[in-house]
Amino acid sequence: METRGPKKILIVEDERGLAISLATLLKSQGYLIVVAEDGLYGTSMAHEENVDLVILDLGLPAGGGFSVLRNLKDSVKTNCIPVFILTAKQEKELEAKAFEMGAAGFFHKPFNPEELLSRIKEILSTGTV
């Protein structure tokens, strides 16, 4: 991965308060943040914004999280972008499905901010999923 200044993270989350909190947390760590409030806009932003990582909610309007994940992993332009799933859903099979589809991380809401930051730093510094 080439060095090009701060890493850019796309947050695809329809819960406005959580998106703002997450953006504030990540900005405090020096990341550039873009936010999309639905799956359709999130997919579009991932293609347009040259992001380094996507944090994706599963329960989204206008294209659920798994649909967005599939679109990102099927596109030549976005298939190498690491995607972290963030969800309030507790079903165990969702985590397995996310990893099978190419997710780089899976976090349940409420999540541990330090754990999330640690995984983001790890993924972005190594460039591997």
Image: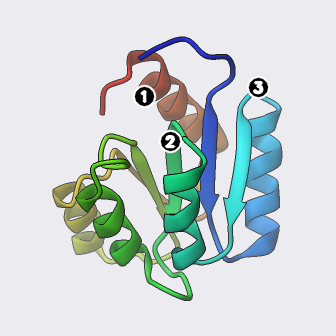
Quadrant of the image containing the C terminus: top left
Disc 3 residue crowd, few under 14, some 14–19, many 20+, Cα 10 Å: few
Residue nearest the viewer, comparing 117 with 2: 2
The amino acid type of the residue labelled 3 equals: Gly
Q: Is residue 31 left or right of residue 3?
A: right
Residue at point 39%, 42% (across, down): 82
Residue at point 71%, 51% (across, down): 34
| Mark number displayed over residue 30 | 3
| Mark number displayed over residue 37 | none
Quadrant of the image containing the N terminus: top left
Disc 1 residue crowd, few under 14, some 14–19, many 20+, Cα 10 Å: some
The residue to which callout 2 is attached is 53
Which x, y percent locates residue 96?
20, 62
* Location of residue 110 by image quarter: bottom right
5 vs 77: above or below: above
Q: In this view, does 34 lie to the left or right of 83?
A: right
Q: Is mark 3 on a helix, strand or loop?
A: loop
First in sequence: mark 1 vs mark 2: 2
The amino acid type of the residue labelled 2 equals: Leu
74 vs 41: above or below: above
The residue to which callout 1 is attached is 123
Which x, y percent locates residue 86?
50, 62
What is the spatial separation of the Cα atoms under label 1 and label 3, in whole angstroms? 15 Å
